[in-house]
Each structure stands twice: as C-alpha cells, then as structure tokens.
Amino acid sequence: MSGQDNTKSHSAATGRSHGNSYRSSNTGLFGSEARSATDVAMQSIVAYIRDNHLKVGDPLPSELTIVESLKLSRSSVREAIRTLVSLDILEVRRGFGTFVADMSLEPLVNGLTLRITLDDDHARSRLIDVVDTRQALDLQISRDVIEHRDDIDGVFLGRLINQMKSAVMRNEPFMESDSMFHDHILSVTSNGLIQELSKALWRVHMVAVPKLHLTTKDNLEQTVDAHQKIVDAIVAGGEDAYRQAVVDHYEPLREALGVK
C-alpha cells in the first residue's frame, strides 16, 4: 500500500476525525465487544470511513499512518484490512493504496452459496428459504411493475424468452437470458436494496440448483412458460395476473424440492 497522505490522512495521523478520536471505542464493528487488536483496527478503519464521509473509490491513509494513529502492530492492521477486503468494504490496488470498495453483496452471495452446497442435510431447506425470499421480493415490486409497465420492453423480454426456449431444446442452461429478463423487470423499481438483494439471491439460486441436481427439461420448460405469463400480465396491466405468474415461475423448483 502506498504512502498516500492528504488532508484526510492528516486527520488520521493526528488521531482526530472531525473532532473525534480516530481510534474507536471498545465496540465491535457490528456492535459487539472487540476481542482482539484486529477487531479494534477493523472498527477504527470503519469509523474513519464513516466519520470522514468517504465514498466508494476514496483513498484511505497509508498503512503506516493507520498503524501510528491506532498504536497497533502492523500485522493487526494488515489483518484488519484483509478482513475488510473480504467483506468488500475495502479494495487494495497494488502500487496505489487502499480504497473504499463498492460494498456489494458479494460476501452474502458466497456465504449463502456455501451454506447451501456444503451441508447436504439442510441444503434443500436452505434453498427453499432463498426461493421464498426471491418470490417475496418479486411480489413486493408488483405494483411498481404494473404502474411502470410502459418502461418495460415487452419485445425485448420476448426475445429473451425465445432464447430460453432454444436453450431448452438444446438441453442447455439459459442463465444469461434469465438474468437479463429479471434485471430488466427489476429496473422499474426505485428500491435499490430490492434490486441488489434480488440479483444476489438469483446468483445463489443459479449456483445451488445445478449442484443439487434439481434441473430437468420438464421443469425448465415450465419455467420458460412462466416467464411468458409474466410478460403477458405486464402487457395486459393486470397486477393480480402478474403476481400469480410470479408464483407460477417458482412452482417448478418448489416441486423439484418437494414443496408446494
């Protein structure tokens, strides 16, 4: 990490951030009591980001500056940075320094996927939870979808459905077309968190289903038909029909999981 020093770094070097001590209290990163020097370093770095109103892409002070201001070992600070990188809170750009990352839901995707695929005894029940949550999010935006249906390109969605049908005939997956289909519908809602969660859970779903050998040609054909019902409901402007089409969309997977 490079020795970037600017006015933000100066705040850290003097141990102050907008009048507050750069080294945080003994409260853990997510509200629990800190248990180690690494915990203290993590919570202090997060406090610095928050107190200085850093945005995605903004640089942090140099490693040396952080070490000196926290009065902790370099190894603790490095371990804290590694952990925050794994959580997608920080990003290390070699030769340039450490920056605020985009804080995506990538750690959630990885964690949920592992929870499902590594535990055979609970894999199906955990995937059902993902399916239930995806369906709930889709239903939550049903009014937005119908109210803003003029912003949805039915012809574009129809082309994607045709791509799905062709893929099924070739006995191939259609993940890209499916992703584009749902992303296009999600684009009409102003709720960014629903968009992020829906996309994250879609990725978990698409990794877990093949690993659990739940995909068959029959349920893929049913899924494609359900996509067409979704488009038909949007074009007709019927919210109840759209909600039923959303439920039908997940029905083939529910049947494969043994759930109604």
Image (cartoon, grey):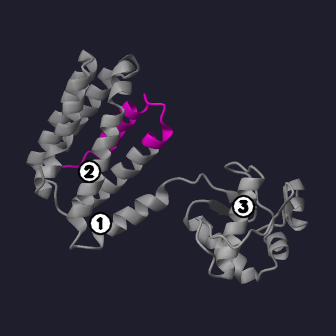
Q: Amino acid at mark 3?
A: Ala
1 and 2 marks in contact (CB < 8 Å): no
Q: Quadrant of the N terminus?
A: bottom right
User: Element at badge 1?
Assistant: helix
Q: Residue at x 78, y 53 (%)?
A: 52
Which mark is drawn over residue 116? Answer: 1
Residue 207 picture quarter: bottom left
| 151, above or below 20, in the image | above
Disc 1 and disc 2: Cα gap in Å? Answer: 12 Å
**Depicted 58 relative to depicted 4: above or below:** above
Element carrying mark 2 = helix
Residue 101 covered by magenta stretch: no
Q: Residue at x 60, y 51 (%)?
A: 102
Relative to residue 254, is residue 209 drawn left or right? right
Q: Position of residue 237 (x, y in %)?
A: 27, 17
Callout 3 environment at 10 Å: few (<14), some (14 to 19), or many (20+)? many
Q: Which residues are magenta?
A: 171-195
Report if residue 98 is visible in the image: no
Query: Residue 40 versus residue 80: which sits nearer the camera?
Result: 40
Residue 47 is labelled as 3
Q: Amino acid at mark 1?
A: Ile
Assess whether mark 1 and mark 3 are in contact (beta carbons under 8 angstroms): no
Number of marks in the rendered image: 3
Answer left or right for 98 relative to 176.
right
Image mark for residue 131? 2
Most extreme residue toward the left, as rendered?
Answer: 218
Residue 134 appears in the picture as rendered: yes
Q: Residues within 10 Å of mark 2 (few under 14, many from 20)?
A: many
